[in-house]
Amino acid sequence: MIRDKSAKKPANQPAKLPKGVIAVAPPSFRRERALLKRGIWPVAGCDEAGRGPLAGPVVAAAVVLDPGRIPKGIDDSKRLTAEKREELFEKICASAAYAVAVASPARIDRDNILRASLWALTRAIHALAEMPKHVFVDGRDRLALPCECEAVIGGDGMVVSIAAASIIAKVTRDRLMSALAQECPGYGFEQHKGYAVPEHLDALDRLGPSTHHRSFFAPVVAAREKHQPWTIKREADLFTVDSSIELETSAGQV
């Protein structure tokens, strides 16, 4: 039998992906829906943006989606273009309850990046108009909250509420960094958002750190040593002999 090569494939046959491309399922509302069916609501997702950069704050967001008005296309913010993130940001803000909290570089320097991030995430949850009955947080660390908190590793790619929070946090932080670029020209914050790309490292080496840089991140420490050596606290070398003690000892032996 001769087959007609122009015949269409059955409608239920999935299209083949290009070689080397792996299909990634978008985040779902499955976990939130399971809680809703048990009468547990509101349910929030929370995530942060900005743990890795050398400059700028960490921004955390908490989002409670409206089950009947979930914007289409919500995904892990890292999988989206800047234009798509901006579009979804506006849709999420128009249809969901959300809150944002910011941990400054000074808090990051004082507490370390992990503690500052967890602090901001907790603040974002408390800033919601109504305290959730259940919280999904991206990562491995649970938050100290007066409700159940569930940590989900890779949650921004699995739980749609967390993905929505990742978009709110990312867009908010990107806008903050673009504003800081006007205050501190020359670093390129509007382009790299404070991350350690070659252009940023070159600017650090050329200009030294700004007040918005995180003092104890290694490239910033190196720039401080070059441009602001008086800000580097050096620990005493335990193997260095104090010359005054050596003189007193010698005098006592005469």
Image (cartoon, helix red, strand yellow):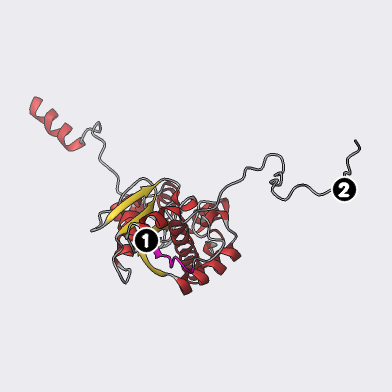
Give the CA distance from mark 2 to mark 1.
50 Å
Which numbered disc flags the more N-terminal residue, 2 or 1?
2
- Extreme residue toward the bottom, this view: 94
Query: Where is residue 230 shown, x and y percent of the image?
Result: 34, 54
Query: Where is residue 60 shown, x and y percent of the image?
Result: 39, 61
Q: Is residue 66 a member of the stretch shown in magenta?
A: yes
Query: Where is residue 191 shown, x and y percent of the image?
Result: 57, 62
Residue at mark 2? 6
Magenta-highlighted residues: 62-69
Q: Is residue 128 left or right of residue 199?
A: left
Q: Quadrant of the C terminus?
A: top left
Mark 2: secondary structure: loop
**Residue 49, picture quadrant:** bottom left
Q: Is residue 213 left or right of residue 241?
A: right
Query: Where is residue 250 shown, x and y percent of the image?
Result: 14, 28
**Residue 88, picture quadrant:** bottom right
Report the residue at 57% width, 50% height from top.
198
Q: Quadrant of the N terminus?
A: top right
Residue nearer the viewer, 215 or 84? 84
Mark 1: secondary structure: strand
For badge 2, the amino acid type reads: Ser
Report the residue at 45% width, 47% height from top.
154
Residue at mark 1? 44
Kindly tell me whether residue 3 is visible in this rendering: yes
- Extreme residue toward the right, this view: 2
Kindly tell me whether residue 103 is visible in this rendering: no
Q: Which mark is residue 142?
A: none
Predominant secondary structure, magenta span:
loop
**Residue 116, picture quadrant:** bottom left
Badge 1 crowding class, 10 Å Cα cut-off, few under 14, some 14 to 19, many 20 or more, is many
For badge 1, the amino acid type reads: Ala
Q: How many marks?
A: 2
